[in-house]
Amino acid sequence: MSLAREASKKSSRQFVSERVCHVPASGIRKFFDLLSGMEGVISLGVGEPDFVTPWHIREAAIYSIEKGHTMYTSNYGLIELRREVARNLKRLYGVDYNPRNEVLITVGVSEALDLALRAITDPGDGIISTDPCYVAYPACVCLAGGTFVTVPTNCDNDFKVLPRDIEARITERTKALLLGYPCNPTGAVMERAELAQIADIARRNDILVISDEIYDRLVYDGAHTCFPSLPGARSRTILLGGFSKAYAMTGWRVGYAAGPADIIEAMMKIHQYTMLCASISSQMAAIEALKSGEEAVQEMVAEYDHRRRVIVKGLNEIGLSCFEPRGAFYAFPTIKSTGLSSEEFAEQLLVEEKVAVVPGNAFGASGEGHVRCCYATSLSEIEEALERMRRFVEKRTG
């Protein structure tokens, strides 16, 4: 090969699409690369239950494998599971869905989010979401070809989004509003009246709402409001839910989407060509979770609630002001008193005291000045982490 031809060859980097190049690496995963090889670290970082999936749920999957249930399922998912999802939503929130064409079983809620955005987004469409928000939101909007539009929230308002701030960002290119309440990373919960105002804004402006409610069962004070249960909201809402948080089933990778049949069918089209179906054994486990898992859910929620009170009280006592999260399993304290940025705080805390937290700016610009502390770990580790954090903060505040 001539030198001229050799010089003209593209590097492998040049073959990567421009859209993917614009997607930043996850701030969470980038930070946790620092953890590799470190001994004695207490992690308040990864948003994963420390509980093992209840035995009767695991047993249902084992039994299904023993019976030879190892084949594909319908692209929509097992009809038995779709029926149980519909029954559960009706029982908990009074929302009716036809399990045959208004419920889609997905490979975790992450896939449901990706499918929803790709199914509705044309190039340049605006998708409005809160800031801070779950790290996948802006990335999935970008990969779908949309424009991510943020609405800042802050601790002065317990990280609730103000309906008027949403409406101020709606333009003729706005396609949908992406909401995640209870919120990862803040633990914020919206009141029913506040969500009703947002539903009215969506109706008046003729936009969709994608409601990510993966933490719906982890609400500690008051009841969760399922967005499509609001007046006039069901016909323009894509509801995302799953099993990973409430049933401690993160590794099973099974979730669902529910919504208008036309949109669910559009999502299924993408799903059938890219994923085909969720694992049948995971779907069988999910059926058992919905049928018989309520007692385990209540036990885990009670334990999370106890840990929540311990970590919030402890953070405030050591000088890291923290509003009371009412949902999910995250505390989001401010670290401004230390004079450190979110990344400096997280990195120095890890190196000096071997406590892992996530920098707040990993979830958006409004997260700067905060860190995310996950309390889905044992009470003894939470208490030890708080003691280490106390030493760390005292060195900097004196």
Image: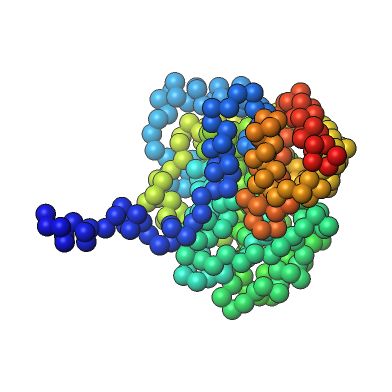
User: Which colour scheme appears in the figure?
Assistant: rainbow
Percent x, y of residue 342 = 69, 48
* The C terminus - image quarter: top right
- Residue 217 makes an appearance in the image: no
Residue 193 visible in the displayed image: yes
Q: Nearer the viewer, residue 42 or 299?
A: 42
Q: In which quarter of the image is residue 203?
A: bottom right
Q: Quadrant of the N terminus?
A: bottom left
Query: Left of 116 or right of it: where is 381?
Result: right
- Tell how many labels: 0
Q: In which quarter of the image is residue 28?
A: top right
In screen coordinates, is 14 left or right of 193?
Answer: left
Residue drawn at (29%, 55%) of the image: 11
Residue 83, given in percent of the width and then of the height, sits at 57, 43
Residue 354 position in % (x across, y down): 67, 30
Res 301 quadrant in image: top right
Q: Which of 20 and 6 is in front in this view?
A: 6
For the point 77% across and 58% down, the residue is: 154
* Image position of 252 with respect to 187: above or below: above
Residue 245 located left or right of residue 284: right
Report the residue at 50% width, 61% height from top: 142
Q: Position of residue 167 (x, y in %)?
A: 71, 72
Q: Name the residue nearer the viewer: 86 or 2.
A: 2
* Residue, far bottom: 172
